[in-house]
Image (cartoon, helix red, strand yellow):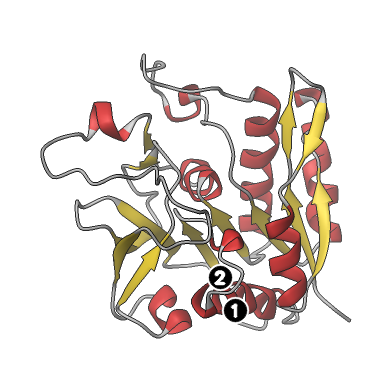
Amino acid sequence: MKPIIGITCDYDWKEDKIQLKTGYVKSVCRAGGLPFLISPVLPHESGMTADIISRIDGLLLSGGQDVDPRHFGDEPHKAIGSVNPWRDELELSLCREAAKARMPILGICRGAQVLNIALGGDIFQDINAQAGGKGLICHSQTAPAWYGFHSIKIREGSRLHGILGTDDLFVNSFHHQAVRRLAPTFEAAAFTSDGMIEAVESREHPFMLGVQWHPECMQEDPFAHRLFEAFVKAAGRPAGDE
């Protein structure tokens, strides 16, 4: 049987729409998984997360809006963008439940940030305002989504390095927030030339990985496919087989 991959969806409260870009679904399918879309729910229904986790084999946290800084003890910076309370509530709870169950987790862009916050780390609310300086590169590209816009350096010996099999990679970039303080059990797995963390991974969990770029937009990129393939393969292993 194909492993069931739960993918978190976005919620547009202005239009009252649940939505997800198709790249996530296509990438999971191409890697051999069966997508299961998870919609944001009202906060008082967040107890449903344990039921959701019991029905899936892997958790994919998609990209989207900014995370409410109250979840990591900060006041909102003047440069923060839109936050989505329902989505924050659900995804933070899902991360913690999935971590407890030792379920494979892949976070993409916002998803990597949510993962880090859920496990005790924090983020820059706006990298230009809080980590800006002469050497800051462009992290919000003016190029097609499938195009690798800037380079990253992947740490040798990291899980990510083992999956991708390369030290250097060009990735796309669409973010103004980024991981700042790592969660206690996390390590940085990749960096940009200006020192921003581009990937995080757990030292203790069998497969818990977050990337700041959007591999689901890079459908023809072999490294993007390898990442999804490794994730889906991990989700297909029997529980306890690490």
Residue depicted at 54% across the width and 72% down the height = 224
Q: Is residue 12 above or below residue 78?
A: below
Residue 72 falls in image quadrant: top left
Q: Amino acid at mark 2?
A: Phe
Which residue is nearer to you in this view: 146 or 166? Answer: 146
Q: Amino acid at mark 1?
A: Ala
Q: Is residue 105 visible?
A: yes
Q: Is residue 41 visible?
A: no
According to the image, label 1 marks what residue?
A: 230
Q: Is residue 207 above or below residue 192?
A: below
Q: Residue furthest left?
A: 134
Question: Horizontal and vertical percent for residue 77?
Answer: 36, 17
Label 2: few (<14), some (14–19) or many (≥20) C-alpha neighbours in 10 Å? many
Q: Which mark is residue 171?
A: none
Which residue is nearer to you in this view: 92 or 97? Answer: 92
Label 1: few (<14), some (14–19) or many (≥20) C-alpha neighbours in 10 Å? some
Q: Earlier in the sequence, mark 1 or mark 2?
A: 2
Question: Horizontal and vertical percent for residue 120?
Answer: 44, 42
| Quadrant (top left/top right/bottom left/bottom right) for the C terminus | bottom right
Mark 2 secondary-structure assignment: loop
Residue 206 falls in image quadrant: bottom right
Mark 1 secondary-structure assignment: helix
Which callout, 1 or 2, points to the residue nearer the camera? 1
Which residue is nearer to you in this view: 105 or 164? Answer: 164
Residue depicted at 52% across the width and 25% down the height = 68
| Cβ atoms at labels 1 and 2 below 8 Å apart | yes
Residue 202 falls in image quadrant: bottom left
**C-alpha distance separating marks 1 and 2:** 9 Å
Residue depicted at 49% across the width and 47% down the height = 119
According to the image, label 2 marks what residue?
A: 207
